[in-house]
Amino acid sequence: MLLEALKLALQAIRRNALRSFLTVLGIVIGVAAVIAMVTIGNGTTAKVTADLAKLGRNLLFVSPGQFGPGRASSTAKPFNVRDVDAMRSQISGAAAVAGVAQRSATIIYGGQNRQVMVTGTDTNYFITQDWSVLAGRQFLDGEVRSGRAVCVIGQTVRDKLFGRGEPIGQRLRVKNVSCEVIGVLEAKGQSIVGTDQDDVVLMPLRAFHRRIAGNTDISTMSISARDGVDTAKVQADIERLLRERRNISRGEQDDFSVRDMKQLAQTQTATTSILTGLLGAVAAVSLLVGGIGIMNIMLVSVTERTREIGIRLAIGALEHQVLTQFLVEAAVLSLFGGVVGILFGLTLAWLATGGLRVPFAIDPTIILIAFGFSALVGVVFGFFPARRAARLDPIEALRHE
């Protein structure tokens, strides 16, 4: 019986091809919108997670000043080398502590010049940032202690200044300082705020202080927690130690901030997941609109085919057979729309993620849900027209013109 109902449904759909196409279009748009939105949202979440992972494992950033509405200004006194030494000796949960000082400066090689962020630090920076040297080497301890003018450059600096040439052993000028290139960092790409992490020059901290900055300030400390140690405990120890060193009394607000990258990653992931859910929910409304379109067209179909229905009932067709025929017709329309919508949605998501440069993260669950929901929409919204057709009085139906 279902096979016969399917044949009749396909015949009815073919007789009104344009109307059937317009009916299916609502389901196609709804399913495509849900799948595209969720896929793009999942790709964005994956991109944010990957970008945060590039910053390093179990990483905490310590900066002078508090930031945000209602907080102290960022004009608090900077850290110094003694603060970094205190962190290394007194924070037991820290695997590595790197003092960081930064300044924008012009670098020159041959006839090329470029404005980049110059970072003064030490060998611990490579550990805390989980950043490897692709070619050459890191700083030697002797170079860090003596303040020798050597530097490790990022991939963007290498490409822009040296092109296909070999940078190792060459000398470039950082501001007015001649600096020997000893290494090239592996590429990290853009940060979560859109800046190029590879457009950087690293120098030993003492050399940076003496020759670039002209002071001994530390703008940031990056601290990597030991494996198995809770970063929340490390953060509490850091805050306690800094309050002591900066003579902050009980009840006074901190003039520094400690940011846990793990908490930031969780917050960012939760935020993007919520936005993905909201976008999917908004797109799902299109499915309901498509369902209403199916009900409307099926009601029109029942009206147009009243005489046909009356003939079927008069020659012995049962109510449930007529009901099944119209339900199958509605289900075929919605399922066809669901399949086309899935293909269209995945194509849109693939194009969008390529343009946005985020991963193409397909979620099979949402595809199954969208397909199942499209089938459910066809059955639910097709039931009322089908029931109306099944309950027609054969005599009245035969009189219908």
Image (cartoon, rainbow, N blue to C red):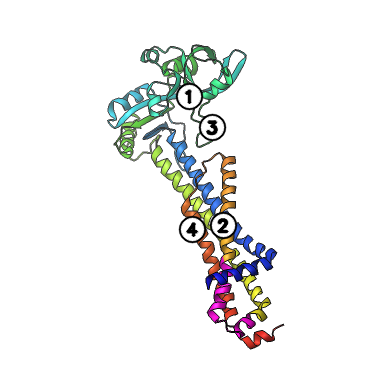
Residue 278, horizontal then vertical, whole percent:
51, 54
Q: Earlier in the sequence, mark 1 or mark 2?
A: 1
Residue 106: which quarter of the image?
A: top right
Q: Can residue 177 be seen by looking at this rendering? A: no
Question: Between marks 3 and 4, how big is the CA–CA gap?
Answer: 38 Å
User: What's the amino acid at mark 4?
Assistant: Ile
Mark 2 in CB contact with mark 3 (< 8 angstroms): no
Mark 1 in CB contact with mark 2 (< 8 angstroms): no
Q: Nearer the viewer, mark 1 or mark 3?
A: 3
Residue under the image location 59 percent in, 69 percent down? 7
Residue 25: which quarter of the image?
A: bottom right
Callout 1: helix, strand or loop?
strand
Foreground residue, 265 or 283?
Answer: 283
| Residue span colored magenta | 309-331
Q: Nearer the viewer, mark 2 or mark 3?
A: 2
Q: Nearer the viewer, mark 4 or mark 1?
A: 4
Residue at numbered disc 2: 339
User: What's the amino acid at mark 3?
Assistant: Thr
Tag shown at residue 102: 1
Which residue is most to the right?
A: 401
Q: Main secondary structure of the magenta part?
A: helix
Q: Nearer the viewer, mark 1 or mark 2?
A: 2
Question: Between marks 1 and 3, how big is the CA–CA gap?
Answer: 15 Å
Tag shown at residue 195: 3
Residue 248, horizontal then vertical, whole percent:
34, 34
Residue at numbered disc 4: 369
Residue under the image location 64 percent in, 82 percent down? 311
